[in-house]
Amino acid sequence: MTASLSAPGSSVMGRSAWLEPWLATLPAPSGPLEAVQVRGRRALREQPVPSSRQEDWRFTDLSLLQQLQQAPGAGDAAAAASAAALPPPAPGAFRLVLDGRSDPLDGVTLPEGLQALNPLEIGQGLGHTLAATGCEQHWPVELNHAAAGTLLALRVTARHSVRLELVSAAGAGLLPLRLLLVLEEKAALEVNQLLLAPGPGSISLVLEAHLARSARLHHGLVALGHPEAALLGHLALEQEPESSANLTAVSAGWGLARLEPRVLQVDGQAVTTLRGLQVVDGRQIADTHSHVRFNGPEGQLDQLHKVVAAGQGRSVFNGAVRVPREAQRTNAAQLSRSLLLSDRARIDTKPELEIVADDVKCAHGATVSSLQTDELFYLQSRGIGADQAAQLLQRAFCEEVLRELPAVARAWCPLEALQRQDGLA
Amino acid sequence: MIRSDAPVLLEIRDLQARVEDKAILKGVNLTVRAGEIHAVMGRNGSGKSTLSKVLAGHPAYTVTGGSVTYRGDNLLELDPEQRARIGVFLGFQYPVEIPGVSNLEFLRVATNARRGEKGEEELDTFAFEDLVRERLKVVQMDPAFLERSVNEGFSGGEKKRNEILQMALLEPVVAILDETDSGLDIDALRIVAGGVNQLAGPDNATLLITHYQRLLDAITPDYVHVMAAGRILRTGGKELALELEQRGYDWVDEELAALEAAGDRTPVEVG
């Protein structure tokens, strides 16, 4: 599986009418991301906007992005109001507000163990993991390249443990977020990232993280959107042996949410945990395309993707796992579980396992069901009303993923936030 | 305890029910008064569990005839949750595991639903924890089970204890216990039966559905009913259970054949 589009230089016939006017509104390339901006804008001019004619975008309609033509700039008064509505920082976590305009580290004293990367390191590291995980030319990544004016580039130094909280709120227009994280040997980083779009608007997130030997990353993403808001996210990881990474992503309420976690175990022997929960209602679309590749032996993957689909919502899951010949004794498990709450909702779920090595364990499974009659009856037989019973069961379904968010994410009460979205009873 | 002047709690008349296209209950008659313990016995497939589920309102079963009156009201027109709130309790043969729903939260919501119906105040988290810890003693259950998901990973005995704990919290008027003894070892059976005995009183009634005499050694029934082919074939005292234990069910088949040949649907009183 690849979500890459036609090669650079292909026909521009498929390009959407909104794109050129939007590109024209962007400020001239400048700053630390100047070269990246030039590259992204060129790529967008050369590549067609993904359409349903491409397998990886078959069910995912990007027409919501047309609104960028009317409101091209990142952040405005609405975003400021949204930022004011953010929950207070979780105890023990270091909070940074990413608004897409100002340098998030300006005037900030970083805690022990956390350092800003210098320009040379940024030059060496930026784009490295995107290329290694095969997504540097993906259209959503190029969109981020074209628009991102600021960068959060951090290193967690060897043997240090850091808890970080990243919060962003979108206003009208596109909020581009670009992150580069380097974890040195035996470093540990827990990141809670909250993305909010309380009204029309879009967020583009591109995160690269490199985990050195024995490093540990726990990244929790809670993305709460609006029916007229779009989220496009790429989370790219490179893992050295004996490192462990947990990516847990929860999204609800977006008109369109497309998340692409991409992991490369560069020499196997690492542990990757992927957790996803996407909630759709109305005419919302949530799409997760994950990609995990083991370039060495004895790697482990534990992946669980859950969906709650109500109304006329549409959910797409495509889980690619690549186990080449050198990845002997890989142990990978992927499970997709979907809860269908409406006759008119749609769920498309597809495992995509490519296994060449012959001594591996690769399990996968997918279930799509409505609420279980026996579970509902059991609760009702104890006096719990049908609606409340359904609510309890839906919450329970979500809880399996929510409890994998980093502990400090509990301060955000993600379950309550999800319930305020339309999808849950 | 039989008292002829005790109020009738449950009156089942000619109850017929089917699941999908298959008729299971074919005319069940049963009267349960306050203070009584009834045992319903019978082979697999005789309709015992169906009777319990129909009384609790399981949506998979359709009532096709007859009536069930609970303290004077038509039970069959109520939703399952309404039946539970007014005091009808079903102890499940196979309690359902519900991952992600905390046992404590489930018990609290259920208890408050029942209390609301009785006009009692809802219990907050702290008051409920006090109550539940006291009722845990009825089934000698470890408080750690409260922190787990409903029945998830519980052994067979733990699930049945959790059922009786729910009964202790909900204080039902009519408790229907569907094969509560199945899957229990001797110690667990003693604890579960002890819980049922503690909860039985002059104002409530218990309907035990069981295959085996061993449960009735621990809980003495006032009446024993033998079900066959979707109806109650015989009714007697506790000695009827002993007779079943000694003679098996073959004689039941013979009696059933004879009665059906004669077109008789009235249960036989013995003892």
Image (spheres, rainbow, N blue to C red):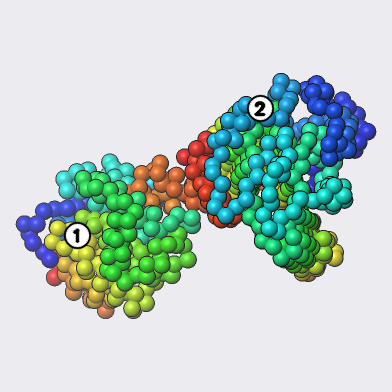
> Which of the image's four quarters has the N terminus of chain B?
bottom left
Is residue B193 placed above or below B67 in the rendered structure?
below
Helix, strand or loop under label 2: loop
Is residue B86 placed above or below A48 in the rendered structure?
below
Location of residue A165 in the rendering, given as x and y in whole percent from the top left corner? 63, 48
Foreground pick, A16 / A197: A197
Residue ID at (60%, 52%): A93
Foreground pick, A396 / A111: A111
Helix, strand or loop under label 1: strand
Task: Give the residue pinned by disc 2.
Answer: A76
Residue ID at (21%, 55%): B173
The amino acid marked with disc number 1 is Ala
Location of residue A76 in the rendering, given as x and y in whole percent from the top left corner? 66, 27
Q: Is residue A281 left or right of residue B152?
A: right
Residue ID at (29%, 45%): B82
Residue ID at (54%, 36%): A85
Q: Which mark is residue B205?
A: 1
Work out whether disc 1 and disc 2 sit on a shared chain.
no
